[in-house]
């Protein structure tokens, strides 16, 4: 009789533990959906154009300014950055142009220098500098 009573108690206790386990899954699912909802809202806030496109007009006042004046200001800002970048490259090339004749003396050939500078195309300035220094060293070695 005792084994039957133990089995009966076990069978009665089993349904009590299942809802706790199911409740954990439900809680985890709710947490996951809360996270999804928060991420969705963040996406709408960060991209108001997309939010309006899908029909959510809460962020219509956050659209970017695409007026001609705003576009012109953005364009001018871009041009200023490009000019500054060009100036950095120009100064580096002038520096290398000043060093090469000093190091090579009569062996300096402006056409060969231009070939080294322009021959590799668009490259980082540190690579350009290394190329020019290699050219200077090779020229020195070729004409002792």
Image (cartoon, rainbow, N blue to C red):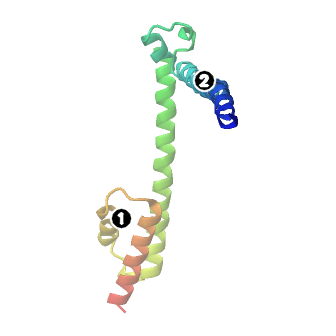
In this rendering, the answer to whether 135 lies above or below 55 is below
Mark 1 vs 2: CB contact within 8 A? no
Give the image location of residue 60, x and y in percent: 53, 9
- Can you say which quadrant of the picture contains the C terminus? bottom left
Is the residue 26 above or below the residue 112 in the image? above
Q: Which is nearer the eye, 106 or 30?
A: 30
Can residue 8 be seen in the rendering of this structure? yes
Mark yes or no: residue 66 visible: no
Q: CA distance from mark 1 to mark 2?
A: 67 Å
What residue sits 70% from the left and 36% below the top?
2
Sequence-wise, the earlier of marks 1 and 2 is 2
Which is more toward the observer, 138 or 13? Answer: 13
Q: Is residue 18 left or right of residue 127?
A: right
Quarter holding residue 53: top left
Circle 2: is it few (<14), some (14-19), or many (20+) Cα within 10 Å? few
Expressed as whole percent of the image width and height from the top left, the position of residue 25 reads 59, 28
Kindly identify which residue carries mark 1.
117
**Quadrant of res 28:** top right
The disc at residue 26 is: 2
Residue 131 position, x and y percent, is 39, 71
Q: Where residue 85 sits in the image (x, y, percent)?
A: 49, 48
Q: Residue at x 33, y 68 (%)?
A: 116
Q: Nearer the viewer, residue 47 or 79?
A: 47
Q: Residue drawn 68% across and 31% down? A: 5
Residue that protrudes farthest toward the front in the picture: 1
Task: Answer with the quarter of the image where residue 4 lies.
Answer: top right
Considering depth in this image, is 34 or 92 the residue closer to the camera? 34
Camera-nearest label, 1 or 2: 2
* Mark 2, secondary structure of its residue: helix
Dot label at residue 71: none
Looking at the rendering, in which quadrant would you find the N terminus? top right
Locate residue 44 relative to residue 107 in the image: left or right. right
């Amino acid at each position: 009789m005792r084994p039957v009573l133990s089995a009966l108690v076990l069978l009665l206790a089993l349904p009590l533990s299942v809802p706790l386990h199911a409740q954990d899954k439900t809680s985890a699912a709710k947490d996951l959906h809360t996270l999804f909802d928060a991420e969705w809202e963040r996406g709408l806030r960060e991209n108001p154009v997309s939010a309006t496109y899908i029909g959510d007009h809460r962020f219509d006042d956050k659209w970017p300014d695409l007026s001609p004046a705003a576009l012109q200001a953005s364009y001018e800002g871009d041009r200023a950055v490009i000019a500054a970048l060009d100036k950095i490259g120009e100064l580096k090339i002038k520096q290398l142009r000043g060093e090469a004749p000093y190091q090579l003396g009569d062996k300096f050939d402006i056409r060969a220098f231009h070939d080294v500078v322009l021959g590799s195309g668009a490259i980082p300035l540190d690579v350009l500098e290394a190329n020019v220094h290699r050219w200077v060293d090779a020229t020195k070695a070729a004409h002792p």
